[in-house]
């Protein structure tokens, strides 16, 4: 419970300076990270690309065909937006990053909408 309160306090602090992303976007990134760690089977550093892949899989599993619409409502329109959320959480100490990690690791990695909708709308 205390960790959960700390998380939401951190999100509130972030949003005082930057309101681009809904509180749910921060929870989604954290849940995606946990989802990914469960998929990997060990707690270790996750690269930007790995986190993006886990986030897409988690969004599809949890939100189905509405995944992109929901993420877009929360402000997550691109892979760069996911990176911005990650690094705001790093800035307040909720997440940690290696010195070699950068917010730019998330820039234009792939088209988020296309990735989230491809399996639902491809007729091939």
Image: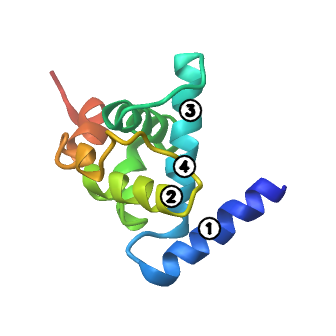
In the current view of this chain or complex, which residue is farthest to the front?
99
Viewer-nearest of discs 1 and 3: 1
In-front residue for pair 21/114: 21
Q: Which of marks 2 and 1 is nearer the N terminus?
A: 1
Question: Residue 70: in sight, yes or no?
Answer: no
Q: Which of marks 3 and 2 is nearer the N terminus?
A: 3
Residue assigned mark 2: 89
Residue assigned mark 1: 10
* Distance from the alpha carbon under mark 4 to that under mark 3: 15 Å
Viewer-nearest of discs 3 and 2: 2
Instruction: Kindly state the secondary structure of the residue where label 1 is placed.
Output: helix
Name the residue at 67% across, 66% down.
Answer: 8
Specify the quadrant of the image occupied by residue 70.
Answer: bottom left
* Distance from the alpha carbon under mark 2 to that under mark 1: 8 Å
Q: In this view, does 70 lie to the left or right of 1?
A: left
Q: Are marks 4 and 2 in contact (CB under 8 Å)?
A: yes
Examine the rendered structure and indicate whether residue 6 appears above or below residue 86: below
Instruction: Kindly state the secondary structure of the residue where label 3 is placed.
Output: helix
Q: Earlier in the sequence, mark 4 or mark 1?
A: 1
Task: Residue 34: give x, y in percent of width and height.
Answer: 59, 35
Instruction: Kindly state the secondary structure of the residue where label 4 is placed.
Output: loop
Badge 3 density bin: few <14, some 14–19, many ≥20, Cα 10 Å: some
Question: Residue 18: in sight, yes or no?
Answer: yes
Q: Which mark is residue 35?
A: 3
In-front residue for pair 11/64: 11
In the current view of this chain or complex, which residue is farthest to the bottom?
16
Q: Which of marks 4 and 3 is nearer the N terminus?
A: 3
């Amino acid at each position: 419970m205390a960790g959960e309160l700390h998380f939401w306090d951190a999100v509130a602090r972030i949003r005082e300076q930057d309101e681009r992303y809904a509180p749910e976007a921060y929870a989604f990134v954290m849940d995606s990270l946990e989802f990914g760690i469960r998929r990997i089977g060990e707690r270790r550093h996750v690269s930007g690309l790995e986190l993006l892949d886990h986030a897409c899989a988690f969004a599809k599993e949890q939100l189905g065909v509405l995944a992109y619409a929901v993420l877009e409502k929360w402000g997550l329109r691109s892979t760069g937006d996911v990176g911005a959320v990650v690094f705001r959480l790093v800035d307040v100490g909720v997440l940690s990053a290696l010195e070699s990690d950068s917010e730019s690791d998330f820039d234009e990695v792939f088209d988020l909408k296309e990735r989230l909708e491809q399996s639902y709308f491809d007729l091939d």
